Amino acid sequence: MRKLLKLGMVYCAGSGTWSFYNNFLCRTPPNPMIHEQKHKKIVVVGAGIVGLSTAYYLSQHPENEVILIDKSERCAQECSTQNGCLVMRYNSVPWTYKPLMGVLRGIWRSDTSQAIYLTKAMQEPGMVKFFWYWLWQNRDVLSTNMMKLNDLQEILLDKLLVDANIDPKSINYEKDSVFYHLGKLQGIDLPKAFEKLAKALPPVPDGAIQDVIFGNQEMSERVFNKFPKFEGLKKYHYAVINPYYTLNTQIFCQKLDSFLKENRPNVKVLYQHELEYFIFDDAEKHLVRGVKVRGKKEVINCDAVVLCAGSFIARLLRENFRLICPVIPVKGYTMDIPTDLPNQKTHLGFRDIAFVATYLEPGYLRIAAFGDLSGQDKSFDPRRVRFLKNTLIERLDKKEVHQYKNLNTCLRPVPPDDAPLIGGLRFYPNVFLNAGHAGRGTTIGLATSKLLSEEIMQGKATSLPDTKPFSPSRFFL
């Protein structure tokens, strides 16, 4: 134990010294003013919804040449396909906000929303930095900032569907669905407990529609009667109702991918191209001039690079730029459950255990659950799968749960403040980040891509008045 403590102290001292030098003593290199360059060749790394939308907005400028690379055989193979398929329109509460003891409980318990595999989690380069920043977050401030992205996303998504000639029905895009966030109350005096809870609910934006229902009669009429087979719902005392949109993210990405290939001649999409390392300028070491792809002899030359690398962003930055990025992979489990319930455009979430049930398509519910810390490990833990099935059986229909299919895991890239990282790196000014969406690429991915493209093309983002809350500089990157 003493040796472990000493190693921890040495690590903290070394990291602190390096951070102090890097952030306060080291001189910032000159800005290459990429936005003033007429013809730009830009490499985008990662082809999920964030990478595809980044390529889409950059390619709106015909003078740009955009090269999109991804190590997979096709687009959208991470969170963009294995998610809850919800545009969480009014969900701005930080995903990472939870009591400290609730986090620590996951170290020794597997029957919790967040299991922590400490050895695997600590292998992530940004884990210690993540925890430090996480301790100091302000939930209300973050909620206000995130809502601005949510507002922008709705406008951009509607415009993109028209521009790319994508039929909303073909991607299950519905703007008239609602989300029931169910919760339980503690104590004997439930009305008093509910009154206390109502005061603590996070703020909603001006014009937002939110309805809170409480009591057996109202819950029966508006919730329980909609789902007569789900007997377990009757354990819940209240529901917060918001408009959420549905969107089959995987199909949307496939259609956007096809649009880029067929309609944007200035975009080249390269799958099965895994990034190996960057080529730096011989004279100006802070500028990236090319990308080397594993197994390929040729180098892809470029004027700028956009990293949309999802949960791998922290390792990529450490290995190539010696930067500690506090974005960590958070593992979620997803599965599809057959159901004979009619599509009532109503989706369910549960405050006591982290999972949502989305009516994905006729006859199926998409379950997205948990937020485990296990590093880059995407394997199934039998204990977690068993706990997930038991959790679903307690709340949904037992027979339907036993017929589940498409069990998957995905790694959500989560920063400590739950807000994405949008912008250029301080010491590598032609390297830009569009990362850290915390599994909300469907909700905010187009908004962040639009803002980043504006920064690259104009020198600053203009769709929002202030993007500092999303700048990588808040983590000294």
Image (cartoon, grey):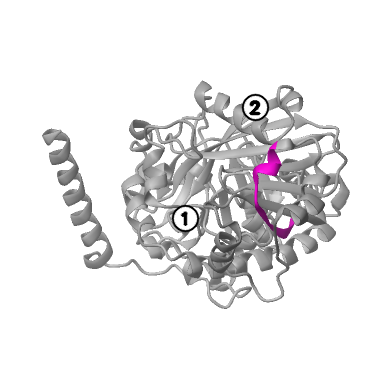
Above or below 144: residue 285 = above
Check the image and report above or below for 467 versus 259. below
12 in relation to 59, above or below: above
Marks 2 & 1, CB-CB < 8 Å contact? no
Residue situated in front as seen by the camera: 234 or 16: 234
Name which quarter of the figure residue 217 lies in.
bottom right
Disc 2 from disc 1: Cα separation: 27 Å
- Residue 253: image x %, image y %? 72, 45
Left/right placement of residue 443 relative to residue 353 reads right
Q: Residue at x 65, y 41 (%)?
A: 83
Q: Which three-letter amino acid code belongs to the residue tagged 2? A: Leu
Residue 243 spot, x, y in % from top left = 75, 60
Residue 184: tell me if it is visible: yes
The residue under label 1 is: 97
* Residue projecting furthest to the front: 188
Alpha-carbon neighbours of circle 1 within 10 Å: few (<14), some, or many (≥20)? Answer: some
Q: Amino acid at mark 1?
A: Tyr
Give the crowd class for mark 2: few <14, some 14-19, many >=20 residues within 10 Å.
Answer: some
Q: Residue at x 35, y 62 (%)?
A: 476
- SS state under label 2: strand
Regarding residue 37, the answer to whether it shows in the image is no
Q: Nearer the viewer, mark 2 or mark 1?
A: 1
- The magenta region covers 232-244
Q: Which residue is mark 2?
A: 407
Could you say which quadrant of the image residue 218 lies in? Answer: bottom right
Question: Is label 1 in a helix, a strand or a loop?
Answer: loop
Q: Earlier in the sequence, mark 2 or mark 1?
A: 1
Spot occupied by residue 471 in the image (x, y as percentages of width and height): 46, 65
